Image (spheres, grey):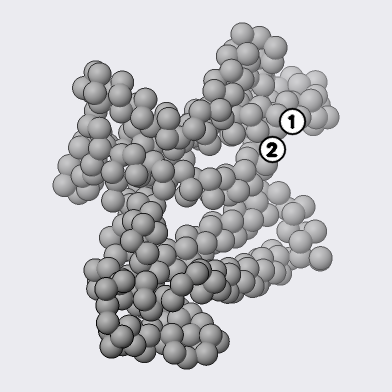
């Protein structure tokens, strides 16, 4: 049954990825103006424009352009940047580790803060800790990333001088320097997700703690710690896993703004720079890769969800 459910989800993800590639390809072709002129530059002569048109297959039918592009993309060949002339694959590979490290630190921060405060708020429902947790989560949901990032730079970098304001140092060169430059961006990026996780965790824990199996466990003499950690927390995480997968899109979009504020050479900054310079091949590749990453993560969350809750794969496998 698990194999049938997994195959069904994989097929759905592949269909979604094909549709996304069509939207990305058609979206850029729908932009006003001639792509060849945009790539060659406003001052380019007719010969250069025609050369650009031939090299990017812009003189071929649209379906030929699409199958050529997607065929090379499946082999890891996204073409060359129109601005630098470097292979797009190499550019992306040099930028993705920065964004992945930032995303992982943000997820770690969000999970530690959000899940912990959510459990405490549910256990201490109606008390001061519950009010405090809800207040902090509302603050995290209400504050935009760009404003919080600027305030962090102003306070911790400019005012107190505790942390660098911007830049990036690879972990292999200086672990401490790497952490110093990523702790503020990770806090900014993870604060909104932590607030979402806190509220969802609190709601799920309240439902779990009021369930019949929890009352039965308490009636049998189970300690409060075992009731909360084993019976309540374990069943509450089922919903939280889905929230984590759905929030990946927010994490990616937030990374674009955060990397711009802290001048991090990540994938998000690459996308912004490509838009400003009208580097269409890079834009096309970046959007496709980010969409594929989102789809893959959601697929993994669905599979993990089915492992945690067998009812999901039973209903999904028979659908």
* Crowd tier of the residue under label 2, counting other residues whose Cα lies within 10 Å: few below 14, some 14–19, many 20 or above: some
Report the residue at 42% width, 35% height from top: 146
Residue placed farthest to the left in the image?
Answer: 173
| Label ID, residue 208 | 1
Where is residue 258? Give x, y as percent. Answer: 39, 41
| Res 14 visible | no
Left of 144 or right of it: where is 236?
Answer: right
Q: Is residue 77 placed above or below 83 in the rendered structure?
A: below
Give the quadrant of the C terminus.
bottom right
Q: Which residue is mark 2?
A: 235
Element carrying mark 1 = helix
* Crowd tier of the residue under label 1, counting other residues whose Cα lies within 10 Å: few below 14, some 14–19, many 20 or above: many
Report the residue at 58% width, 14% height from top: 132
Residue 51 figure quarter: bottom left
Foreground of the two, 218 or 55: 55
Real-space Cα separation, disc 1 to disc 2, in angstroms: 7 Å
Where is residue 148? Give x, y as percent. Answer: 42, 29
Residue 137 figure quarter: top right
Q: Is residue 224 placed above or below 174 in the rendered structure?
A: above
Report the residue at 63% width, 15% height from top: 130
Report the residue at 81% width, 66% height from top: 318
Among numbered discs 1 and 2, the one appearing first in the sequence: 1
Determine whether label 1 and label 2 are within 8 Å by CB: yes
Left of 195 or right of it: where is 50?
Answer: left
Foreground of the two, 277 or 213: 277
């Amino acid at each position: 049954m698990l194999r049938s459910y997994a195959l069904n989800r994989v097929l759905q993800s592949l269909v979604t990825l094909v549709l996304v590639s069509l939207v990305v390809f058609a979206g850029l072709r729908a932009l006003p103006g001639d792509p060849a002129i945009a790539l060659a530059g406003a001052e380019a002569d007719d010969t250069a424009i025609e050369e650009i048109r031939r090299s990017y297959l812009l003189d071929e039918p649209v379906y030929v352009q699409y199958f050529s592009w997607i065929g090379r993309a499946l082999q890891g060949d996204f073409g060359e940047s129109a601005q630098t002339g470097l292979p797009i694959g190499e550019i992306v590979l040099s930028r993705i580790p920065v964004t992945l490290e930032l995303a992982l630190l943000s997820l770690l921060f969000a999970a530690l803060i959000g899940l912990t405060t959510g459990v405490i708020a549910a256990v201490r429902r109606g008390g001061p800790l519950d009010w405090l947790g809800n207040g902090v989560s509302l603050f995290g949901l209400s504050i935009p990333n760009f404003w919080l990032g600027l305030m962090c730079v102003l306070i911790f970098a400019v005012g107190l001088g505790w942390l660098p304001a911007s830049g990036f140092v690879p972990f292999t060169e200086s672990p401490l320097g790497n952490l110093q430059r990523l702790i503020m961006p990770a806090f900014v990026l993870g604060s909104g997700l932590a607030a979402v996780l806190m509220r969802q965790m609190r709601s799920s824990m309240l439902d779990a703690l009021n369930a019949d199996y929890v009352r039965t466990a308490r009636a049998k003499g189970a300690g409060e710690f075992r009731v909360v950690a084993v019976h309540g927390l374990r069943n509450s995480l089922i919903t939280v896993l889905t929230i984590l997968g759905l929030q990946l899109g927010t994490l990616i979009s937030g990374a674009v703004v955060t990397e711009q504020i802290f001048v991090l050479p990540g994938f998000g900054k690459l996308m912004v720079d490509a838009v400003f310079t009208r580097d269409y091949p890079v834009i096309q590749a970046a959007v496709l890769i980010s969409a594929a990453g989102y789809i893959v993560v959601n697929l993994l969350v669905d599979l993990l969800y089915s492992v945690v809750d067998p009812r999901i794969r039973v209903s999904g496998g028979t659908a």
